């Protein structure tokens, strides 16, 4: 589609906004005046300024149907401390209303496309106070009342966790990018074990070396490791003895005194008594057992090889071994899932009473097999997924499993959010630190990204490891070399204790 513009440079924002309604449409821009082919999908977004007044107009159309909106305001009506940004938001809001009129679909998050809405809310609250921030989110971002309420609840809970991180605190992420098989919706670089199992021993050996090297840097910089998160992929794709080697290495390098040590056990089909015992004996405080759905038909449709019953067995096994902080991930909007079946999933999870539940919205990336085969989702599926996440919020909250952190991804079904819920006192604090960018996360393994956060000016710098295990193995020296940037960064941004 083409968006015709005039009087501004908000192309990037308008393109992101357009993707909320037309996620896989190719978007091009043209200047006002070029002939509009009104039978094709198009939009316009114009700004004119005359004697301190702004005249904004937008339209969207297809097949002869066009929706137009106009608004005039003066410089004195600007409430945000960044007038240029407010102008952008007002224009985006106008175009948003045109898309709503054209499609009949109103995304609950309005024009907000960023991945950290709580962080944005905090910024506005500091600049405008709470009432001003609420007003801006409703009037300019067009966020619905229910999402604003959720946003404020998660922002409040995140605040308490963020305050625990003191100067010099960091977290460590360790990546195990292998899975037993590939789920149809997955766009992660994870290797199915059928194709990559022979790489695991060499991968693990080098991963342990990278952990050692990272620990030396941490020691030299006098940093404190607050949380460690072993994620993937599916870390329990490793055997019990491989998990033991890895966890021993983590303790010998980073110590035992973490606020939180998580292993994302992930898929129930990889969980065994032996592995759980190793994980427990190695002091892991939090694990994930991720069903995604408790409907066997849906599990089959997404390419998972386990059943809902396997999830229940894995959960009780973990309880028997003594895990008292278990997270379970669910996904709203999975192919073939229905609102009723999702409700049953939520109810079954509540019956198990895990300490944490994370409700994701299905994210559709172009690389995922599902998108390639079946095309983009339509609005009905977004609306249905919206009802699913609303139901999860209601039922979990009733059961004192409360929202504590949130993030969003691009191209999710219904433009919805991912929310972490927990029983009070069991929040997964690493999740908050990574999403808020509270402190540096030093990451080891293939596809891992180290994120350095300066404490003096909030600057963020990233160091990327190679994505795939074979690249990680073949270019390991380069990965180690890149880690030199950590010390350079901290020399430029010393910690202020
Ligand atoms: S378990 Fe997760 S990382 Fe692995 S294939 Fe499935 S969605 Fe991807």
Image (tube, helix red, strand yellow):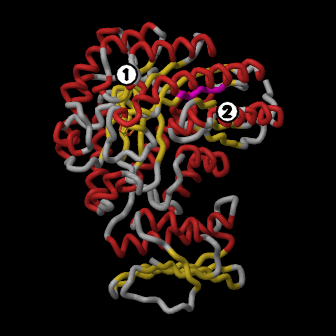
Q: Quadrant of the C terminus?
A: top right
The magenta stretch is 170-174
Residue 222 sits inside the magenta stretch: no
Q: Secondary structure at mark 1?
A: strand
Q: Which residue is mark 2?
A: 477
Residue 33, above or below 235: below
**Seen in the image, is 330 located left or right of residue 308?**
right
What is the CA distance from the residue labelled 2 to the residue labelled 1? 37 Å
Residue 172 sits inside the magenta stretch: yes
**Ligand 1 lies in quarter:** top left
Q: Earlier in the sequence, mark 2 or mark 1?
A: 1
Q: Is mark 2 within 8 Å of ligand 1?
A: no
| Residue 409: numbered disc | none
Q: Is residue 482 visible?
A: yes
Residue 158 picture quarter: top right
Q: Which residue is mark 1?
A: 326
Residue 287 picture quarter: top left
Q: Position of residue 210 (x, y in %)?
A: 62, 25
Residue 108 picture quarter: bottom left
Q: Position of residue 193 (x, y in %)?
A: 37, 32
């Amino acid at each position: 589609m083409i968006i015709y513009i005039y009087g501004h440079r908000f192309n990037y924002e308008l393109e992101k906004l357009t993707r909320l309604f037309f996620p896989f449409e190719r978007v091009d821009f043209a200047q006002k005046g070029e002939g509009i082919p009104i039978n094709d999908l198009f939009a316009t977004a114009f700004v004119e300024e005359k004697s301190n007044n702004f005249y904004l107009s937008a339209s969207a159309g297809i097949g002869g149907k066009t929706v137009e909106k106009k608004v005039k305001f003066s410089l004195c009506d600007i409430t945000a401390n960044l007038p240029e940004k407010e102008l952008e938001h007002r224009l985006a809001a106008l175009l948003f209303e045109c898309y709503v009129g054209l499609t009949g679909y109103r995304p609950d998050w309005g024009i907000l496309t960023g991945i950290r809405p709580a962080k944005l809310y905090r910024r506005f609250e500091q600049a405008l106070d709470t009432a001003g921030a609420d007003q801006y989110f409703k009037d300019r971002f067009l966020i619905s009342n229910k999402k604003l309420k959720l946003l404020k609840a998660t922002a409040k809970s995140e605040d308490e966790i963020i305050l625990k991180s003191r100067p010099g605190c960091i977290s460590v992420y360790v990546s195990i990018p292998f899975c037993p098989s590939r789920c149809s919706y997955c766009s992660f670089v994870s290797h199915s074990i059928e194709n990559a199992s022979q790489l695991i021993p060499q991968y693990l050996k080098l991963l342990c070396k990278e952990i050692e090297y990272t620990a030396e840097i941490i020691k030299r910089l006098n940093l404190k490791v607050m949380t460690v998160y072993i994620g993937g992929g599916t870390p329990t794709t490793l055997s019990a003895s491989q998990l033991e080697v890895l966890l021993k290495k983590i303790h010998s390098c980073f110590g035992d005194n973490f606020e939180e040590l998580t292993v994302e056990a992930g898929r129930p089909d990889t969980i065994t008594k032996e592995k759980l015992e190793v994980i427990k004996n190695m002091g892991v405080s939090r694990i994930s057992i991720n069903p995604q759905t408790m409907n066997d038909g849906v599990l089959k449709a997404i390419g998972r090889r386990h059943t809902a019953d396997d999830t229940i067995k894995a959960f009780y096994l973990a309880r028997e071994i003594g895990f008292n902080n278990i997270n379970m991930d669910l996904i709203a909007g999975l192919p073939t899932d229905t609102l009723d079946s999702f409700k049953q999933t939520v109810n079954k999870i509540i019956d198990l009473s895990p300490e944490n539940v994370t409700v994701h919205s299905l994210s559709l990336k172009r690389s995922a097999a599902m998108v390639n085969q079946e095309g983009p989702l339509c609005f009905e599926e977004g609306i249905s997924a919206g009802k699913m996440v609303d139901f999860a919020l209601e039922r979990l909250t009733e059961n004192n499993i409360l929202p504590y952190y949130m993030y969003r991804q691009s191209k999710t079904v219904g433009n919805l959010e991912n929310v972490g819920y927990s029983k009070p006192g069991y929040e997964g604090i690493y999740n908050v630190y990574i999403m808020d960018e509270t402190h540096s996360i030093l990451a080891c393994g293939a596809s891992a990204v180290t994120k350095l956060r300066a404490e003096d000016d909030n600057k963020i710098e990233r160091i990327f490891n190679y994505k795939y295990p074979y690249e990680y193995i073949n270019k390991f020296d380069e990965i180690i070399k890149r880690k030199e940037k950590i010390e350079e960064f901290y020399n430029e941004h010393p910690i202020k204790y």
